[in-house]
Image (tube, helix red, strand yellow):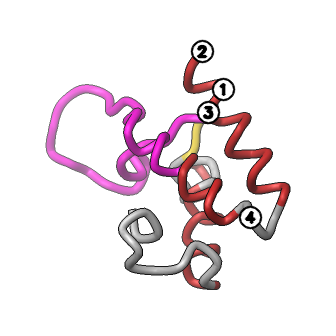
Amino acid sequence: MMPLVFFMAPHDPMMEKTIDAMMQAPHNGGLLSNSLIYRYNVNEVNDGLSGDEGTFNICTFWLVEALTRAGTSDPKKLERARLIFEQMLG
């Protein structure tokens, strides 16, 4: 959300590292699974609720927008945003 509300520039090195960390698989400490984002790492956090946690669509859309904003200087991020968006729609 930080680049979306102009709290931090999408090209800020800390934001880019945050996006890169989120895009790791949950078993690697990240939040991305099958091009969908979890609200939190279900392998690392015990929320005290029974059942499984699913991915959270709005978080995936926020990632797509953050990647799109960061992609103005990095075509690979823009392409990744497009692919995640298309898979989300599917």
- The kind of secondary structure element at disc 1 is helix
Where in the figure is residue 28, as x and y percent of width and height?
Answer: 62, 56
Q: Nearer the viewer, residue 36 or 6?
A: 6
Q: What is the three-letter code of the residue carrying label 4?
A: Thr
Assess disc 4: are there few (<14), some (14-19) or many (≥20) residues with their C-alpha within 10 Å of its C-alpha.
Answer: few
Which quadrant, please, contains the C terminus?
top right
Judging depth in this view, the residue of 66 and 21 nearest the camera is 66
Mark positioned earlier in the residue sequence (4 or 2): 4
Viewer-proximal residue, 73 or 83?
A: 73
C-alpha span from label 2 to label 3: 9 Å
User: Is the residue marked by circle 3 packed among few (<14), some (14-19), or many (20+) residues within 10 Å?
Assistant: some
Q: Earlier in the sequence, mark 4 or mark 3?
A: 4
Q: Quadrant of residue 54?
A: top left
Q: Position of residue 63 (x, y in %)?
A: 53, 51
Q: Please give the residue where the numbered disc 3 appears in the rendered image.
A: 85
| Sooner in the amino-acid sequence: mark 2 or mark 3 | 3
Could you tell me if the residues under marks 2 and 1 are in contact, i.e. CB atoms within 8 Å?
Answer: yes
Question: Which residue lies under the disc numbered 2?
Answer: 90
In this rendering, is residue 66 above or below 90?
below
* Amino acid type at mark 3: Phe
Q: Residue at x 64, y 78 (%)?
A: 11
Between marks 1 and 4 in the image, the one whose residue lies nearer the viewer: 4
Disc 3 + disc 1, Cβ < 8 Å? yes
Task: Identify the secondary structure beneath mark 2.
Answer: loop
Q: In the figure, is residue 43 to the left or right of 67?
A: left
The residue to which callout 1 is attached is 86
Q: Which residue is mark 4?
A: 72
Q: At which x and y percent is residue 12?
A: 60, 83
- Of callouts 1 and 4, which one flags the residue occurring earlier in the amino acid sequence? 4
In magenta, the rendered stretch is 34-63
Give the CA distance from mark 3 to mark 1. Answer: 4 Å
